Amino acid sequence: MPVNISGTTLLATTAQQGAGLVNAFQLIQATTIISPSELALNDSIRQASSYTIEVTNIGNETVTYNINHSGAALATGLRKENDMLLAQPLYSADYAVSST
């Protein structure tokens, strides 16, 4: 269940949402491989305009995958005018976008 930033309707950033806990039992029974296992979405030096995710079914049954995207808030720790560090991050609705 996605989490909002306190007192707003903005979805919390990925760092605040977390990746969740590993369920070892489900891991052993998994029939899906997703590659790559992580994406560096805010790598300013090597920023890509798009990313490819490969979803592979290694099970014996046909599977339908539904992939959705919900843009989370942008968080910055620097003041725009002079790059001074802020005591609290600033959040904005500059969402990531998705395309199919």
Image (spheres, rainbow, N blue to C red):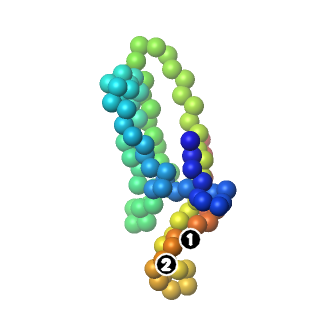
Question: Could you say whether the residue bearing mark 1 is in a helix, strand or loop?
Answer: strand
Numbered disc total: 2
Residue 30 coordinates in the image, percent (x, y): 38, 25
Q: Quadrant of the C terminus?
A: top right
Residue 28 appears left or right of 97: left
Residue hosting label 2: 86
What residue is rendered at 66% in x and 60% in y? 8
What residue is rendered at 48% in x and 77% in y? 87
User: In terms of depth relative to the viewer, which is nearer, 4 or 46?
Assistant: 4
Question: Could you say whether the residue bearing mark 2 is in a helix, strand or loop?
Answer: strand
Q: Mark 2 near mark 1, Cβ–Cβ under 8 Å? A: yes
Give residue 12's mark. none
Q: In which quarter of the image is the N terminus?
A: top right
Measure how far apart labels 2 and 1 are at the Cα level.
8 Å
User: Image quarter for residue 72?
Assistant: bottom right
**How dense is the environment of label 1, judged by Cα within 10 Å: few (below 14), some, or many (20 and up)?**
few
Looking at the image, the residue that sits furthest to the front is 7
User: In terms of depth relative to the viewer, which is nearer, 89 or 98?
Assistant: 89
What residue is rendered at 36% in x and 22% in y? 29
Residue 2 coordinates in the image, percent (x, y): 57, 46
Residue hosting label 1: 90
**How dense is the environment of label 2, judged by Cα within 10 Å: few (below 14), some, or many (20 and up)?**
few
> Could you tell me if residue 13 is visible in this image?
yes
For residue 74, above or below residue 38: below
Residue 83 coordinates in the image, percent (x, y): 48, 82
